[in-house]
Image: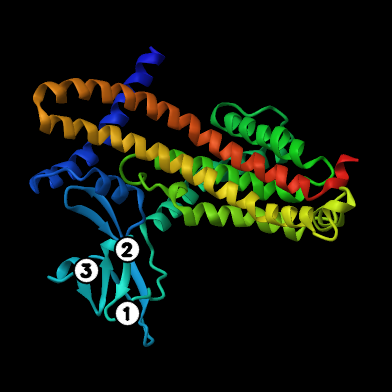
Amino acid sequence: MQIIKYIRLGLFLLLMLLVPVAAMANEDEAGGEINVQEIIFDHMSDAYEWHLWGHTHISLPVIVKHHEGGWEIFSSARFHESADGTYKGFYIDKGRKGKVYEQGYEDRPWDVSITKDVVQIWINIFVLLLIFIPCARWYKKRLAEGDHAAPKGFKGAVEMLTMYIHDDVIKACIGEKHYRPYAPYLLTVFFFIFVTNLVGLLPIFPGGSNVTGNLSITMLLAVGTFLLVNIFGNKEYWKEILWPDVPMMMKCPVPLMPVVELIGIFTKPFALMMRLFANMFGGHTVILSLTCLIFITWKVSTGMGASMTVVSFLMLIFMNCLELLVAFLQAYVFTMLSSVYIGLAHPGHHK
Protein backbone atom coordinates (compact mmCIF):
# COMPACT_ATOMS: atom_id res chain seq x y z
CA MET A 1 0.00 0.00 0.00
CA GLN A 2 2.86 2.36 0.77
CA ILE A 3 4.31 1.79 -2.70
CA ILE A 4 0.97 2.66 -4.31
CA LYS A 5 0.84 5.89 -2.31
CA TYR A 6 4.33 6.84 -3.46
CA ILE A 7 3.43 6.05 -7.09
CA ARG A 8 0.32 8.22 -6.85
CA LEU A 9 2.35 11.04 -5.31
CA GLY A 10 4.94 10.77 -8.09
CA LEU A 11 2.26 10.83 -10.79
CA PHE A 12 0.62 13.84 -9.17
CA LEU A 13 3.92 15.75 -9.05
CA LEU A 14 4.61 14.92 -12.69
CA LEU A 15 1.16 16.17 -13.63
CA MET A 16 1.96 19.39 -11.81
CA LEU A 17 5.13 19.62 -13.89
CA LEU A 18 3.26 19.13 -17.16
CA VAL A 19 0.61 21.79 -16.44
CA PRO A 20 2.84 24.92 -16.36
CA VAL A 21 5.02 23.70 -19.23
CA ALA A 22 1.91 22.87 -21.26
CA ALA A 23 0.63 26.38 -20.67
CA MET A 24 3.90 27.86 -21.94
CA ALA A 25 3.86 25.49 -24.90
CA ASN A 26 0.30 26.48 -25.78
CA GLU A 27 1.30 30.15 -25.74
CA ASP A 28 4.06 29.45 -28.26
CA GLU A 29 1.77 27.20 -30.27
CA ALA A 30 -0.54 30.15 -30.84
CA GLY A 31 2.40 31.79 -32.61
CA GLY A 32 2.89 28.68 -34.72
CA GLU A 33 6.01 27.23 -33.10
CA ILE A 34 7.14 25.85 -29.75
CA ASN A 35 10.43 27.48 -28.78
CA VAL A 36 12.01 24.86 -26.49
CA GLN A 37 15.08 26.93 -25.78
CA GLU A 38 13.00 29.92 -24.72
CA ILE A 39 10.75 27.78 -22.49
CA ILE A 40 13.71 26.15 -20.77
CA PHE A 41 15.73 29.30 -20.21
CA ASP A 42 12.68 31.31 -19.10
CA HIS A 43 12.10 28.68 -16.43
CA MET A 44 15.77 28.37 -15.45
CA SER A 45 16.81 32.02 -15.43
CA ASP A 46 16.12 34.68 -12.82
CA ALA A 47 13.27 37.11 -13.50
CA TYR A 48 11.45 40.18 -12.17
CA GLU A 49 8.20 38.25 -11.98
CA TRP A 50 7.12 34.74 -11.02
CA HIS A 51 5.31 33.02 -13.86
CA LEU A 52 2.51 30.71 -12.69
CA TRP A 53 0.52 29.60 -15.75
CA GLY A 54 -0.73 31.15 -18.97
CA HIS A 55 -0.61 34.91 -18.55
CA THR A 56 -0.82 34.69 -14.75
CA HIS A 57 2.25 35.79 -12.83
CA ILE A 58 3.32 37.42 -9.57
CA SER A 59 4.89 40.83 -10.13
CA LEU A 60 7.95 41.55 -7.97
CA PRO A 61 9.49 44.88 -6.86
CA VAL A 62 12.05 46.48 -9.17
CA ILE A 63 14.61 48.67 -7.37
CA VAL A 64 17.00 50.46 -9.74
CA LYS A 65 19.06 53.65 -9.81
CA HIS A 66 19.18 56.15 -12.67
CA HIS A 67 22.60 56.76 -14.19
CA GLU A 68 22.15 60.44 -13.38
CA GLY A 69 21.21 59.69 -9.78
CA GLY A 70 18.01 58.87 -7.93
CA TRP A 71 16.37 55.56 -7.15
CA GLU A 72 13.16 54.14 -8.57
CA ILE A 73 11.02 51.52 -6.82
CA PHE A 74 8.07 50.09 -8.73
CA SER A 75 6.32 46.84 -9.60
CA SER A 76 7.54 44.85 -12.61
CA ALA A 77 3.92 44.94 -13.83
CA ARG A 78 4.62 48.52 -14.96
CA PHE A 79 6.65 47.17 -17.87
CA HIS A 80 3.52 45.48 -19.26
CA GLU A 81 1.37 48.60 -19.05
CA SER A 82 3.16 50.54 -21.79
CA ALA A 83 3.20 49.66 -25.48
CA ASP A 84 7.01 49.78 -25.74
CA GLY A 85 7.62 47.99 -22.42
CA THR A 86 9.34 50.93 -20.72
CA TYR A 87 8.68 52.66 -17.43
CA LYS A 88 10.43 55.88 -16.35
CA GLY A 89 13.20 55.19 -18.88
CA PHE A 90 13.82 51.59 -17.78
CA TYR A 91 13.10 48.47 -19.80
CA ILE A 92 13.81 44.72 -19.74
CA ASP A 93 16.23 43.66 -22.48
CA LYS A 94 15.31 40.10 -23.46
CA GLY A 95 18.47 39.83 -25.56
CA ARG A 96 20.70 40.42 -22.54
CA LYS A 97 19.49 37.80 -20.06
CA GLY A 98 16.25 39.67 -19.33
CA LYS A 99 17.92 42.31 -17.17
CA VAL A 100 16.78 45.90 -16.60
CA TYR A 101 18.50 48.61 -18.63
CA GLU A 102 18.04 52.35 -18.88
CA GLN A 103 17.30 53.99 -22.22
CA GLY A 104 20.32 55.74 -23.70
CA TYR A 105 22.87 53.68 -21.79
CA GLU A 106 24.64 50.43 -22.70
CA ASP A 107 25.84 49.56 -19.20
CA ARG A 108 23.44 48.33 -16.55
CA PRO A 109 22.15 50.61 -13.79
CA TRP A 110 22.49 49.76 -10.12
CA ASP A 111 19.93 46.99 -9.67
CA VAL A 112 18.96 45.62 -6.23
CA SER A 113 15.54 44.33 -7.26
CA ILE A 114 13.73 41.56 -5.41
CA THR A 115 13.81 38.93 -8.15
CA LYS A 116 12.38 35.42 -8.35
CA ASP A 117 15.56 33.83 -7.00
CA VAL A 118 15.63 36.24 -4.06
CA VAL A 119 12.05 35.36 -3.11
CA GLN A 120 12.86 31.66 -3.53
CA ILE A 121 15.80 32.01 -1.13
CA TRP A 122 13.52 33.70 1.41
CA ILE A 123 11.03 30.84 1.05
CA ASN A 124 13.81 28.28 1.51
CA ILE A 125 15.04 30.06 4.64
CA PHE A 126 11.48 30.06 5.98
CA VAL A 127 11.29 26.29 5.34
CA LEU A 128 14.58 25.78 7.20
CA LEU A 129 13.24 27.80 10.15
CA LEU A 130 10.08 25.69 10.18
CA ILE A 131 12.28 22.59 10.37
CA PHE A 132 14.88 23.59 12.93
CA ILE A 133 13.08 25.93 15.35
CA PRO A 134 10.64 23.21 16.51
CA CYS A 135 13.57 20.77 16.77
CA ALA A 136 15.58 23.23 18.84
CA ARG A 137 12.59 23.87 21.15
CA TRP A 138 12.11 20.12 21.60
CA TYR A 139 15.76 19.64 22.58
CA LYS A 140 15.62 22.62 24.95
CA LYS A 141 12.50 21.26 26.62
CA ARG A 142 14.00 17.77 26.84
CA LEU A 143 17.17 19.07 28.52
CA ALA A 144 15.13 21.14 30.99
CA GLU A 145 13.12 18.07 31.97
CA GLY A 146 16.20 15.85 32.14
CA ASP A 147 14.79 13.50 29.53
CA HIS A 148 17.44 11.61 27.55
CA ALA A 149 15.13 9.70 25.25
CA ALA A 150 16.02 9.72 21.55
CA PRO A 151 13.72 11.75 19.28
CA LYS A 152 11.26 9.95 17.05
CA GLY A 153 9.59 10.61 13.74
CA PHE A 154 10.60 13.70 11.79
CA LYS A 155 12.79 15.10 14.59
CA GLY A 156 14.63 11.80 14.73
CA ALA A 157 15.26 11.90 10.96
CA VAL A 158 16.60 15.48 11.24
CA GLU A 159 18.91 14.46 14.10
CA MET A 160 20.15 11.41 12.20
CA LEU A 161 20.96 13.46 9.09
CA THR A 162 22.56 16.26 11.12
CA MET A 163 24.78 13.92 13.11
CA TYR A 164 25.75 12.00 9.99
CA ILE A 165 27.00 15.17 8.27
CA HIS A 166 28.55 16.44 11.52
CA ASP A 167 30.42 13.28 12.48
CA ASP A 168 31.12 11.44 9.25
CA VAL A 169 31.77 14.43 6.98
CA ILE A 170 32.76 17.59 8.85
CA LYS A 171 34.56 16.05 11.82
CA ALA A 172 36.18 13.29 9.75
CA CYS A 173 37.48 15.62 7.01
CA ILE A 174 38.65 18.56 9.12
CA GLY A 175 39.89 16.67 12.14
CA GLU A 176 38.69 16.48 15.74
CA LYS A 177 41.00 19.28 16.85
CA HIS A 178 39.82 21.99 14.45
CA TYR A 179 36.31 21.11 13.25
CA ARG A 180 34.16 22.85 15.89
CA PRO A 181 34.39 26.49 14.65
CA TYR A 182 33.46 25.42 11.11
CA ALA A 183 30.63 23.00 11.89
CA PRO A 184 27.84 25.64 12.11
CA TYR A 185 28.76 27.11 8.72
CA LEU A 186 29.09 23.75 7.00
CA LEU A 187 25.84 22.38 8.43
CA THR A 188 24.05 25.55 7.34
CA VAL A 189 25.48 25.23 3.84
CA PHE A 190 24.47 21.57 3.61
CA PHE A 191 20.87 22.07 4.66
CA PHE A 192 20.49 25.25 2.61
CA ILE A 193 21.65 23.50 -0.57
CA PHE A 194 19.63 20.35 0.21
CA VAL A 195 16.36 22.19 0.89
CA THR A 196 16.94 24.56 -2.03
CA ASN A 197 17.47 21.63 -4.39
CA LEU A 198 14.32 19.88 -3.16
CA VAL A 199 12.11 22.99 -3.35
CA GLY A 200 13.52 23.70 -6.82
CA LEU A 201 12.09 20.38 -8.02
CA LEU A 202 8.54 21.61 -7.35
CA PRO A 203 7.26 22.80 -10.73
CA ILE A 204 4.91 25.51 -9.43
CA PHE A 205 4.92 28.22 -6.78
CA PRO A 206 6.34 28.26 -4.09
CA GLY A 207 8.96 26.15 -5.85
CA GLY A 208 10.28 25.98 -9.36
CA SER A 209 13.06 28.55 -9.17
CA ASN A 210 16.41 26.94 -9.95
CA VAL A 211 18.44 28.78 -7.31
CA THR A 212 21.42 26.41 -7.25
CA GLY A 213 21.37 26.50 -11.05
CA ASN A 214 22.21 30.20 -10.79
CA LEU A 215 25.95 30.79 -11.12
CA SER A 216 25.82 33.85 -8.84
CA ILE A 217 24.40 31.79 -5.97
CA THR A 218 26.89 28.94 -6.28
CA MET A 219 29.72 31.48 -6.58
CA LEU A 220 28.64 33.12 -3.31
CA LEU A 221 28.60 29.74 -1.56
CA ALA A 222 32.06 28.92 -2.95
CA VAL A 223 33.41 32.31 -1.87
CA GLY A 224 32.31 31.54 1.71
CA THR A 225 34.45 28.40 1.71
CA PHE A 226 37.30 30.26 -0.01
CA LEU A 227 37.37 32.92 2.73
CA LEU A 228 37.28 30.39 5.57
CA VAL A 229 40.11 28.38 4.05
CA ASN A 230 42.46 31.28 3.34
CA ILE A 231 41.70 33.58 6.26
CA PHE A 232 41.90 30.92 8.98
CA GLY A 233 44.54 28.68 7.39
CA ASN A 234 47.52 28.17 9.72
CA LYS A 235 51.20 28.85 9.10
CA GLU A 236 51.91 25.35 7.82
CA TYR A 237 49.18 25.76 5.20
CA TRP A 238 50.76 28.92 3.81
CA LYS A 239 54.23 27.40 4.04
CA GLU A 240 53.10 24.46 1.89
CA ILE A 241 51.78 26.94 -0.66
CA LEU A 242 54.58 29.52 -0.76
CA TRP A 243 57.50 27.19 -0.01
CA PRO A 244 56.35 23.56 -0.39
CA ASP A 245 58.48 20.59 0.65
CA VAL A 246 59.69 19.66 -2.85
CA PRO A 247 63.14 19.57 -4.50
CA MET A 248 64.78 23.00 -4.71
CA MET A 249 64.89 22.88 -8.52
CA MET A 250 61.07 23.08 -8.49
CA LYS A 251 61.11 26.23 -6.34
CA CYS A 252 64.18 28.12 -7.46
CA PRO A 253 65.11 29.91 -9.66
CA VAL A 254 61.68 29.37 -11.30
CA PRO A 255 58.97 29.09 -8.57
CA LEU A 256 57.06 26.37 -10.41
CA MET A 257 55.40 24.64 -7.43
CA PRO A 258 54.50 27.85 -5.53
CA VAL A 259 52.78 29.13 -8.68
CA VAL A 260 50.87 25.85 -9.04
CA GLU A 261 49.85 25.98 -5.38
CA LEU A 262 48.73 29.61 -5.67
CA ILE A 263 46.61 28.74 -8.70
CA GLY A 264 45.12 25.90 -6.67
CA ILE A 265 43.82 28.42 -4.12
CA PHE A 266 41.40 29.71 -6.77
CA THR A 267 40.68 26.50 -8.69
CA LYS A 268 39.27 24.78 -5.59
CA PRO A 269 36.37 27.23 -5.02
CA PHE A 270 35.89 27.42 -8.80
CA ALA A 271 35.38 23.65 -8.87
CA LEU A 272 32.87 23.94 -6.00
CA MET A 273 30.96 26.62 -7.85
CA MET A 274 30.85 24.89 -11.23
CA ARG A 275 30.11 21.39 -9.90
CA LEU A 276 26.96 22.47 -8.06
CA PHE A 277 25.81 24.80 -10.85
CA ALA A 278 26.34 22.36 -13.71
CA ASN A 279 24.67 19.39 -12.02
CA MET A 280 21.55 21.26 -10.97
CA PHE A 281 21.25 23.23 -14.21
CA GLY A 282 21.73 20.09 -16.29
CA GLY A 283 19.16 18.06 -14.37
CA HIS A 284 16.46 20.72 -14.70
CA THR A 285 17.26 21.13 -18.39
CA VAL A 286 16.82 17.41 -19.09
CA ILE A 287 13.47 17.30 -17.26
CA LEU A 288 12.12 20.33 -19.11
CA SER A 289 13.42 19.02 -22.45
CA LEU A 290 11.61 15.70 -21.96
CA THR A 291 8.42 17.57 -21.08
CA CYS A 292 8.65 19.82 -24.13
CA LEU A 293 9.26 16.76 -26.30
CA ILE A 294 5.69 15.63 -25.62
CA PHE A 295 4.16 18.78 -27.06
CA ILE A 296 6.56 18.91 -30.01
CA THR A 297 5.77 15.36 -31.14
CA TRP A 298 2.02 15.93 -30.83
CA LYS A 299 2.39 18.73 -33.38
CA VAL A 300 4.10 16.30 -35.78
CA SER A 301 1.49 13.51 -35.63
CA THR A 302 -0.97 11.92 -33.24
CA GLY A 303 0.77 8.52 -33.33
CA MET A 304 4.20 9.94 -32.61
CA GLY A 305 2.79 12.18 -29.93
CA ALA A 306 1.03 9.30 -28.17
CA SER A 307 4.09 7.04 -28.25
CA MET A 308 6.52 9.76 -27.13
CA THR A 309 4.16 10.78 -24.35
CA VAL A 310 4.50 7.32 -22.82
CA VAL A 311 8.29 7.26 -23.29
CA SER A 312 8.77 10.81 -21.98
CA PHE A 313 6.46 10.16 -19.03
CA LEU A 314 8.46 7.10 -17.96
CA MET A 315 11.73 9.00 -18.43
CA LEU A 316 10.33 11.88 -16.37
CA ILE A 317 9.55 9.50 -13.51
CA PHE A 318 13.11 8.19 -13.65
CA MET A 319 14.67 11.68 -13.91
CA ASN A 320 12.64 13.10 -11.04
CA CYS A 321 13.61 10.17 -8.83
CA LEU A 322 17.23 10.67 -9.88
CA GLU A 323 17.02 14.40 -9.13
CA LEU A 324 15.86 13.60 -5.59
CA LEU A 325 19.08 11.66 -5.15
CA VAL A 326 21.13 14.39 -6.85
CA ALA A 327 19.58 17.01 -4.54
CA PHE A 328 21.16 15.21 -1.57
CA LEU A 329 24.39 14.22 -3.32
CA GLN A 330 25.21 17.76 -4.44
CA ALA A 331 24.65 19.14 -0.95
CA TYR A 332 26.77 16.29 0.45
CA VAL A 333 29.59 16.75 -2.08
CA PHE A 334 29.73 20.52 -1.61
CA THR A 335 29.91 20.11 2.18
CA MET A 336 32.44 17.29 1.98
CA LEU A 337 34.78 19.16 -0.40
CA SER A 338 34.49 22.33 1.68
CA SER A 339 35.41 20.28 4.76
CA VAL A 340 38.37 18.73 2.93
CA TYR A 341 39.66 22.15 1.83
CA ILE A 342 39.29 23.52 5.36
CA GLY A 343 41.05 20.44 6.73
CA LEU A 344 43.93 21.01 4.30
CA ALA A 345 44.25 24.53 5.69
CA HIS A 346 45.15 22.95 9.06
CA PRO A 347 47.78 20.37 8.04
CA GLY A 348 49.13 20.14 11.57
CA HIS A 349 46.21 17.92 12.65
CA HIS A 350 47.56 15.06 10.52
CA LYS A 351 50.71 14.82 12.58
Q: Residue at x 30, y 45 (%)?
A: 40
> Horizontal and vertical percent for residue 309?
21, 24
The answer to whether residue 172 of the structure is visible from this angle is: yes
Q: CA distance from mark 2 to mark 3?
A: 16 Å
The residue at which mark 3 appears reads as: 79
Colouring: rainbow
Q: CA distance from mark 3 to mark 1?
A: 18 Å
Kind of residue sitting beneath label 2: Arg
* Earlier residue among tags 2 and 3: 3
Q: Residue at x 27, y 24 (%)?
A: 313
Kind of residue sitting beneath label 3: Phe
Quadrant in which the C terminus appears: top right
Q: Nearer the viewer, mark 2 or mark 3?
A: 2
Query: Relative to the observer, which residue lies in front, 334 or 274?
Result: 274
Q: Mark 3 touching mark 1, by CB under 8 A?
A: no
Quadrant in which the N terminus appears: top left
The residue at which mark 2 appears reads as: 96
The answer to whether residue 16 of the structure is visible from this angle is: no
* Earlier residue among tags 3 and 1: 3
The relative height of residue 150 versus residue 86 in the rendered view (above or below) is above
The residue at which mark 1 appears reads as: 105
**Which mark, residue 49?**
none
> Horizontal and vertical percent for residue 143?
72, 39
Point out the residue furthest to the bottom here: 68
